[in-house]
Image (spheres, grey):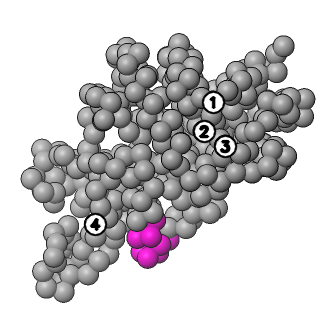
Amino acid sequence: MREKVAWLADPRHHPGRPRAVAVIETHFSWVFLAGSRAYKLKKPLRRASMDHRTLARRERACREELRLNRRLAPDVYLRVVPLLGCPDGGLTLRQPPAGDCRIIEWLVQMRRLAADRMLDRVIATAGLRTTDLDRLAATLAAFFRHAEHRPLADGAYRARLRREIRRNADELRARDLGLSRLRIAALARAQLGFIARQPRAFAGRGARLVDGHGDLRPEHVYLGRSAADVCAIDCLEFDRNLRRLDPAEEIAFLALECARLGAAGAAKELIRRYRGVAGDPAPPALMDFYMSRRAGLRAQIAAWHLRDDAFAGQARQWRALAHSYLADALRYIQRAAAP
């Protein structure tokens, strides 16, 4: 993979010869920003329900990513393209290939979005407007309205939430992560207690489950310049079960991340506007519960970086981030349980 990453990072190898290629490494992939295009290369990893170790599996994953992301960003996700290896040892993205070049990798090709209109950047520059929130709420409500419905009975939904809370706590308690076991135990106890004491908060929620986005964070939301531009990218494509969500939980996750960026007021307004346009009566206590749950999951993801060699030397940073999310998770569940 090292040779492929180096080749794709070279501006000479991209159409139009852009001045530079920005390379972004994530837990599961590399993204190359080259001129008006972006290319995503998946790492050959296996994690739980995700297995990208073979070329054929990575091709399937790329095609699934294209299909799923076109639901919320149809004009952004363009195609799946091959990276070709040629007999002379060179690589090429040109099609059709010359000579006996063979496919050695698959990439998702995307239209590059203006960075200054991504939601996280707009928040950072204090440029978020009420019209942005209205457009975003309307776009997300429409997406959830037309998404594939995957309902559960309320009892089965609460049981699923309990299993996921216990699994989250077990993951966070792993000795090699070095996180506060007292804080983890307190969080799981409070979240499970909320489900037990307030079953009415979950009334009808199981019937609302859809095949959603799964990773709705500000850095994945594009506000654009008009209502037609608004979209969300980079959905969680590798696990259908993790995308089986209450739309209110997806909105709560986005609100959580906006608040962490310093836009707590905008987070509240986003929830209010979404509830209005979607006609969703999700009570505030339920939204706080969902924000707590997503913060617990984000703590788990942050902690997983401690095991990734690609982030060696950054243990203090990732452990601090995990503890920060745990603190948020406790604060929101305490607010949810308050009279």
Between marks 4 and 3, how big is the CA–CA gap?
A: 36 Å
200 left or right of 278 in image:
right
Q: CA distance from mark 2 to mark 3?
A: 7 Å
Say which amino acid is labelled 3: Arg
Q: Residues within 10 Å of mark 4 (few under 14, many from 20)?
A: some
Residue at mark 3:
208
Query: Mark 2 to mark 4: distance in Å?
Result: 32 Å
* Type of amino acid at the residue the image marks with label 1: Asp
Determine which of the numbered discs, if any, sits on residue 333 in the image.
Answer: none
Tell me where residue 175 appears, x and y as whole percent.
76, 46
Identify residue type, mark 4.
Val
Could you say which quadrant of the image residue 165 lies in?
top right
Q: Position of residue 182 (x, y in %)?
A: 83, 31
Q: Which residue is mark 2?
A: 247
Whether pointer 2 and pointer 1 mark residues with C-beta atoms closer than 8 Å, the reply is yes
SS at badge 2: helix
Task: Relative to 106, say whether 303 is above or below.
Answer: above
Q: Which residues are magenta?
A: 53-61
Dots 2 and 3: beta carbons under 8 Å? yes
First along the sequence among labels 2 and 4: 4
Where 328 falls versus 304 (above or below)? above
Dot 1, crowdedness within 10 Å: few (<14), some or many (≥20)? Answer: some
Q: Is there CB contact under 8 Å for labels 3 and 1?
A: yes
**Could you say which disc has been placed on residue 81 in the image?**
4
- Label 2: few (<14), some (14–19) or many (≥20) C-alpha neighbours in 10 Å: many
**Which tag, 2 or 3, sits closer to the chain's start?**
3
Three-letter code, disc 2: Pro
